Image (cartoon, rainbow, N blue to C red):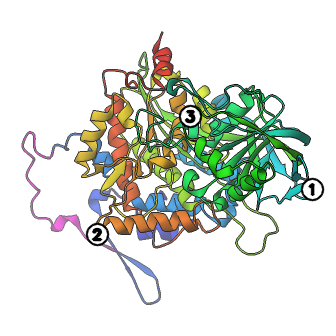
Amino acid sequence: MKTHPIARLFSPFGVAGSTLSFLLLPAALLALSVTATPAHAFQVQIQSPFKIKKKPPKPKPGENKPPPDTIQKYEAMIDPEAIRGHVKFLADDDMEGRYPGLRGGNLAAKYIASQFQNFGLKPAGDGGTYFQNIDFVGMKVNPDETTFSLIPGTGDPIPLKYADDYTVANQTLTPAVDIAAPIVFVGYGITAPEFKWDDYAGVDVKGKVILCIVGDPPSDDPNFFAGKALTYYGRWTYKFEEAARKGAIGALIIHKTDLASYGWDVVKNSNTSEKTFLKDDKNPHLQAASWVQYDVAKKIFATTGLDFEQLFAAAGKPGFQPVELSVKLQAHVASTVRPFQSPNVVGMLTPATKPIPDQAILYTAHYDHLGMVPGMKGDNIYNGAADNATGVGMILELAHVWSQVKMPLPHSVIFAAVTAEEQGLLGSEFLGQNPPIPQGQIALDINYDMILPLGKPQEISVNGAQRTSFYQQVQQTAKGFDLTIVPDPRPEAGSYYRSDHFSLSRVGIPAFSIEEGTLFEGHDHAWGEAKFKDFEDHDYHNFTDNYHPEWDFAGNAKLDRLGMELGWNVINTTKPIVWNKGDEFEAARLASLKP
């Protein structure tokens, strides 16, 4: 809101919303014009209303009637500069990289909650607050005390160098563990009965360390490990989970850039800072959840006399048999243990009359990032401007505009800024298990994560939406925004399983992220592809993911408008949104819809 110059003069803070108590005459009697003299003194000239010779004619019935309220009217209020303001604030050095449970992360959570309060959202966290507090344990490896060595059947131990050769996290949440265990090569580390695939067949890995390849077995068949697309079986989180379920005490994931879709720097930067775990997680865990470089895997096999390349290739074919190697891992993992709390920030708009059952739209974005490296010279802050101050700025502007809607809401609208995404989607996992309303009453989750401010996109990816009964509506709505829906541009990267919508899907809630394609107004595909490649190569999970004044947030606003219209369609739909028949999340959804 713009403030009249006189208001700014008499306001002690010069902010919008000041009142002028000294102007007591009715507005109809005064027409004010304000001019500044060279001496900066303000003059108020009063023009007599009696110079008006005749009154304007009375409007005829039906004239001057305000236009009907439409959701498009409110979508037009979404302001790209408001999104910019949130991003600039959240990516500031004072936020210290927004690490969960530390000063910067807590400041970011309080900022988001203050915005929700200003917008008039109802608190949907603990005890009438916006904060859904989560108990975590942070585990920070002490590099000077931690050792990893390969112990071959014959010959000298081969020491490995922390961060350069391997990363490790102790998931058992104890200060120190010692490991001396044989290594078993289990191919891709997958047990998938639907594909008749079992990399653990015929081998007992209890008390041992497994070695496996990142990603899925190679496939061109969409009915076999989804072809070129990465399934959850290919994600590092699954491989650690499955190894622990099988009784292993450690897991070494072999990194290869083309299979992982990101370089070793991403692994190192993401895993050498403090790692976060849910304190009360009852699932089995590993004493050493580790990544190793491809060349380290070669060293492991070199000590055994086995042909590494041959076994690597065999692991991708049906009938592979796991191999216990004649080499052991000897390790001492020392960690600093830090119990802490970090909140999801949750607010909602509710109908005047509570619907039974509710069919809410949920908007999510993670606000955490990788923090900072104390004592490091130069730029030592992971500011996370694109990842994911952009997404948070977008749901904040959505919350602001949704709060202005005067039309009756038939169902609830929920906004959740979640924590600890960078630590394995932990905040959204907790939200999915502890939603503000029952899971079956959340019709759809729309997630925003890392929307590069490159201008207005002409293409979008909504990977996951095609697996739901809502997809036709998504297609129609996107067309109305002149947006072409394109397939996931990099299905091999497994993006669906790498962002917070996945946590909601796992409990049955239909969910997907809205993402940009590579075609933007005024540019060709090559330009967009080059921009994304440059960001991934140089800025993703790096100290250089900073705010840039030249960023163009028009596209972020456009995707917000799309999300708002989709949300309006969701809360006005008459049928529950479900996963398609046979989808991996269908059973959880059907269970959640039971009374």
Segment colored magenta: 45-64
Magenta part mainly helix, strand or loop?
loop
User: For residue 184: magenta?
Assistant: no
Q: Which residue is mark 1?
A: 156
Instruction: Say the numbered circle drawn on residue 503.
Output: 3
Compared across the picture, whether 561 is left or right of 370 comes to left
As rendered, which of 430 and 53 lies closer to the eye? 430
Q: Amino acid at mark 3?
A: Ser
User: For residue 62: magenta?
Assistant: yes
Compared across the picture, whether 244 is left or right of 256 comes to right
Task: Relative to 573, say whether 291 is above or below.
Answer: below
CA distance for labels 1 and 3: 45 Å
Residue neighbourhood size for the residue with mark 1, other residues' Cα within 10 Å, grouped as few (<14), some (14–19), many (≥20): few
Circle 2: element type: loop
Q: Residue at left 21%, top 64%?
A: 49
Question: Can residue 241 be seen at all in this image of the molecule?
Answer: yes
As rendered, which of 361 and 239 lies closer to the eye? 239
Q: Residue at left 46%, top 51%?
A: 394
Task: Relative to 279, say whether 10 is above or below.
Answer: below
Residue neighbourhood size for the residue with mark 2, other residues' Cα within 10 Å, grouped as few (<14), some (14–19), many (≥20): few
Give the residue at the far top of this rendering.
595
As rendered, which of 133 and 542 lies closer to the eye? 542
Q: Which residue is mark 2?
A: 522
Q: Amino acid at mark 1?
A: Asp
The percent coordinates of residue 14 (x first, y second) are: 53, 66
Compared across the picture, whether 18 is left or right of 545 comes to left
CA distance for labels 1 and 2: 61 Å
Compared across the picture, whether 27 is left or right of 147 comes to left
Contact, mark 1 vs mark 2 (Cβ under 8 Å): no
